[in-house]
């Protein structure tokens, strides 16, 4: 069930602790209908669901807070990182189209994907500059700056996931577990 995978892989995004999460999900009969239903349900809470890449047997699902991604894409530092990677538009749909294209044209994940997941820019840049080596800590991402803040975030994300899994298992629906978007 896709809703269970969202709980397991994206609870911090549902709880508004994190900009986005990414996970692979098996493609099977009924996936498109289930995806569309959950997409409609989450949209009302300010959460978007998108398939970034699809193969015969799995979908790379991206779940994100639309307002948080819009804010990130307006950041000058993030734009400086993305421009040389081929990003010309910094609205959500334009940036996601470029990301999809880069994911489908590459054998590896484009390193800038960290900004779409809400990783600190310093850590995304550190990962790129160090080729993924020499990090201070490793958790949801490789940490190159502000280790204490990152470790605290990792603990919050794990706690959130644990609580959400328990609540979901006890019958609390995804709609109740998704924190609504902040008023504009």
Image: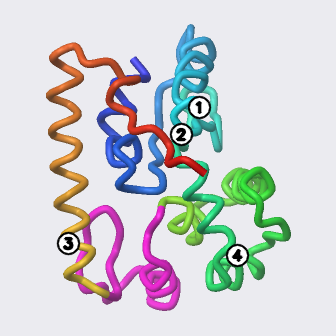
The residue located at (79%, 69%) in the rendering is 87
Span of residues in magenta: 118-145
Examine the structure image and report whether residue 128 is included in the region drawn in magenta.
yes
At mark 2, the secondary structure is strand
Task: Return the disc, 1 or 3, that comes first in the chain's sequence.
Answer: 1
Among the 4 quarters of the image, the one containing residue 81: bottom right
Task: Work out how far the residue at label 1 is from the one at label 2, CA to CA, in angstroms.
Answer: 5 Å
* Sooner in the amino-acid sequence: mark 3 or mark 4: 4
The image's colouring method is: rainbow
Q: Nearer the viewer, residue 68 or 60?
A: 68
What percent of the width, then of the height, locates residue 63?
Answer: 51, 42
Numbered disc 1: secondary structure: helix
Q: Say the numbered circle drawn on residue 47.
A: 2
What whole-number distance in Å separates the C-alpha atoms at marks 3 and 2? Answer: 25 Å
Single out the mark in the foreground, 4 or 1.
1
In the picture shown, does residue 74 fall above or below 61? Answer: below
Query: Residue tagged by mark 4?
Result: 82
**What residue does disc 1 label?**
43
What is the spatial separation of the Cα atoms under label 4 and label 1, in whole angstroms? 26 Å
139 on left or right of 78: left
Residue, far front: 183
Instruction: Determine which residue is flagged by label 3.
Output: 151
């Amino acid at each position: 069930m896709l809703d269970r995978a969202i709980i397991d892989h994206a609870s911090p995004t549902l709880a508004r602790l994190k900009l986005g999460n990414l996970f692979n999900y098996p493609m099977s009969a009924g996936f498109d209908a289930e995806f569309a239903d959950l997409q409609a349900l989450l949209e009302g809470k300010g959460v978007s669901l998108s398939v970034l890449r699809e193969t015969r047997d799995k979908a790379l699902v991206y779940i994100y807070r639309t307002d948080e991604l819009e804010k990130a894409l307006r950041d000058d530092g993030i734009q400086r990182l993305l421009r040389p990677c081929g990003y010309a538009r910094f609205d959500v749909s334009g940036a996601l189209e470029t990301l999809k294209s880069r994911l489908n044209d590459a054998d590896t994940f484009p390193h800038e994907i960290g900004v779409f997941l809400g990783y600190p820019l310093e850590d995304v840049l550190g990962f790129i500059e160090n080729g993924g080596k020499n990090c201070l800590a490793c958790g949801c991402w490789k940490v190159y700056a502000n280790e204490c803040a990152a470790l605290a975030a990792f603990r919050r994300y794990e706690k959130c996931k644990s609580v959400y899994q328990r609540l979901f298992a006890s019958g609390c629906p995804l709609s109740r577990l998704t924190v609504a978007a902040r008023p504009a």
